[in-house]
Image (cartoon, coloured by chain):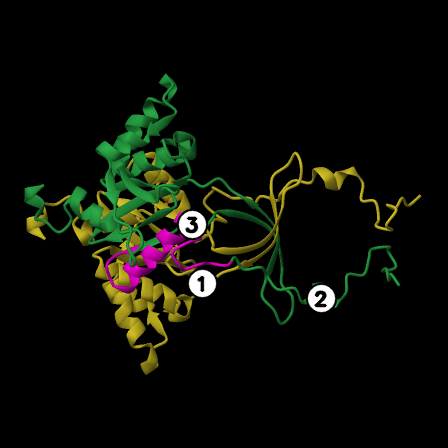
Chain colours: A green, B yellow
Amino acid sequence: MAVNYPNGQRYQGMKSAVKRPQVRQQTFGNRGMTFEQMINDSNDYYLSKGVAVIHKKPTPIQIVKVDYPKRSAATIKEAYFKQASTTDYNGVYQGKYLDFEAKETQNKTSFPLSNIHQHQIDHMQQCLAQQGLVFLLVYFSTLKECYLLEANDLLMWWNQKDLGKKSIPYKYFQDHVHKVPIKIAPRIAYLEIIDTVFRIGENDDKQ
Amino acid sequence: MAVNYPNGQRYQGMKSAVKRPQVRQQTFGNRGMTFEQMINDSNDYYLSKGVAVIHKKPTPIQIVKVDYPKRSAATIKEAYFKQASTTDYNGVYQGKYLDFEAKETQNKTSFPLSNIHQHQIDHMQQCLAQQGLVFLLVYFSTLKECYLLEANDLLMWWNQKDLGKKSIPYKYFQDHVHKVPIKIAPRIAYLEIIDTVFRIGENDDKQ
């Protein structure tokens, strides 16, 4: 027999009352890990080894309504996604400010610039002006290859976008961009590239 | 006459359909501004003048349920606050990594250490180990005075907490801590203190 509430809504059974928040399953094996998970994993590794302090910024949210039920955690009942004003990752490595965005593409022949947004470009330029170490990590997921593209290089391509070049060819990455080692730990060993490109640890006079 | 939907739910009228998210009003006058607003205001000023790139990190949220209504923005219907793993502010100033927490107290005689959490202390220590410029901005709101307490100084007090010293006396701030100028723009001129304390802009050899 169907049982309805007086207002006509269908009775859903007690199961719905004890429904738990759905936590996204993370796979830490070799397969099934998104690029974001691989980066976060690498940052956890770097942090645990005292190598660097790099965190992903939380997604910016405009909170409108919060419930404070007795005997349980505050629940956000209404909120909206806000436009971010920065890149996703930043932190400190041997006194240097690091700032980067991480993007994944299934494309095998090029990296579409539509993956990048104007606010990220603006933020990168601001950080470059403050002498930050700024870059983009690109993961070609089908090829399982990761590249570290320096921000100045990205800006060059971005500025050619209006001339009709809407993507960076894979060949360009192969020939001109730093390939990031993919290992067991850290998964995405991007700090090895930072050491080389920005000569971290060398005497300032030699730069 | 009351009009109900077939399922018995009350018809709410068209007004609810066009209800807009409530955006928190910000006051940019001299009074009514929280310390957080004053800091954000100062960071906006520094960014607009090309002086530094410092942002407040968004509040970390665990999103459980999102609605995607047609013809309007995605609405988060269920989410929970997560424990942060860092301080609230970081960024770059003349190549240096800056990291700080900002705290406000109405107390006139001391700053209670209960305002600080263990995860913030841990993060500060990690950033110090990477040679970041790390500090705490304390605002005595009743006195309208702001101080920049270096992280090493804060750690000294934090480590004495278990000996019964649960707060830092106002007298200590007066005698030993850098007082931050409060101005029209930037409101909280904390980078002036950074210049002095960490000798930004001077030749590295002189440090």
Label 1 element class: loop
Question: Badge 1 is on which residue?
Answer: B106
The chain that hosts pointer 1 is: B
Could you tell me residue A58's position as x and y percent?
Answer: 44, 51
Front one among B33 and A198: A198
Label 2 element class: helix
Mark 1 → mark 2, Cα distance in angstroms: 47 Å
Residue visible at 74% across and 67% down in the picture: A14
Residue A48 part of the magenta-drawn span: yes
Neighbor class of circle 2 (other Cα within 10 Å; few <14, some 14-19, many 20+) is few
The chain that hosts pointer 2 is: A
The chain that hosts pointer 3 is: A
Q: Residue furthest bottom?
A: B163
Compared to residue B59, the image places residue A140 above or below, namely above
* Residue A70 figure quarter: bottom right
Residue A158 in sight: yes
Check chain identity for marks 1 and 2: say if they share one: no
Compared to residue A158, the image places residue B134 above or below, namely below
Is label 3 or label 2 in front? 3
Mark identifier at residue A15: 2
Type of amino acid at the residue the image marks with label 1:
Gln
Question: Badge 3 is on which residue?
Answer: A34
Left or right, B22 with respect to A174, comes to right
Range shown magenta: A25-53
Type of amino acid at the residue the image marks with label 3:
Thr
* Residue A68 figure quarter: bottom right
